[in-house]
């Protein structure tokens, strides 16, 4: 299950429990809408309450990331999961976005909104 919040060029996604392909497609629609009307979008993924995701979500995420590799400005990820953190580093190979991991929601929100933070912040 996901919760989506949009404001200007910012999209905040909170994943709770299982992250399904239907959830990911809902996210894709929000991103495509944002790109159409705002240009580049900034994302905040709060994955702290995500329990798991399926292989089809991982595959769709890889395809979507490659298709929209230049459509993102900043991507903040909140997670305690090492596998998710590792996959974030892999995504950097396919995307031009500035991608950072955060431990604190407030710092992630500020950074996605445009605040300049040191690379080690979060």
Image (spheres, rainbow, N blue to C red):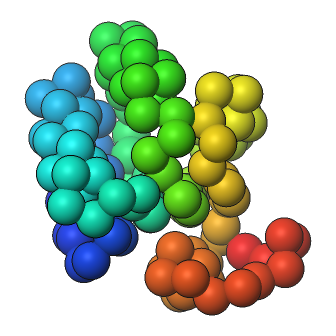
75 left or right, relative to 46:
right
Q: Is residue 64 above or below residue 48?
A: above
Q: On the rendered structure, is 101 left or right of 22?
A: right
Count of numbered labels shown in the rendering: 0
Using the rendered view, name the quadrant where residue 103 is placed. bottom right
Position of residue 90 in the picture relative to residue 118 (left or right): left
Indicate the quadrant where residue 87 lies: top right
Is residue 111 or residue 72 the one in the foreground? Answer: 72
Q: Is residue 113 left or right of residue 18?
A: right
**Rendering coords of residue 108 (x, y %):** 56, 75
Q: Which of the 4 quarters of the picture holds residue 54?
A: top left
- Which residue is rendered at x = 41% and y = 24% of the image? 67
Q: In x, y percent, where is residue 8?
A: 27, 77
- Residue at position x 72%, y 28% from top? 93
Task: Identify the residue at horizontal 65%, vertical 67% (top origin).
Answer: 102
Can residue 48 be seen in this snapshot? no
Q: Is residue 9 or residue 103 the one in the foreground?
A: 9
In the image, what residue occupies the spot 21% across and 24% down?
21
In this rendering, does residue 115 appear at all? yes
Please provide percent x and percent y for residue 85.
67, 42
Quarter of the picture containing the C terminus is: bottom right
Looking at the picture, does residue 11 appear above or below residue 30? below
Residue 7 in the image: x percent, y percent? 24, 78
Q: Nearer the viewer, residue 16 or 78?
A: 78
**Quadrant in which the N terminus appears:** top left
- Return the residue nearer the eye: 75 or 47: 75
Q: Is residue 83 above or below residue 98?
A: above
């Amino acid at each position: 299950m996901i919760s989506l919040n949009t404001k200007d060029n910012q999209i905040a996604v909170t994943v709770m429990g299982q992250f399904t392909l239907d959830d990911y497609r809902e996210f894709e629609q929000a991103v495509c809408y944002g790109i159409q009307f705002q240009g580049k979008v900034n994302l905040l993924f709060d994955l702290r309450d995500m329990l798991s995701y399926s292989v089809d979500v991982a595959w769709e995420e890889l395809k979507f990331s490659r298709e929209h590799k230049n459509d993102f400005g900043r991507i903040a990820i909140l997670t305690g999961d090492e596998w998710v953190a590792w996959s974030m580093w892999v995504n950097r190979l396919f995307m031009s976005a500035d991608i950072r991991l955060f431990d604190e929601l407030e710092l992630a929100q500020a950074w996605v909104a445009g605040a300049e933070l040191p690379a080690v912040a979060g």
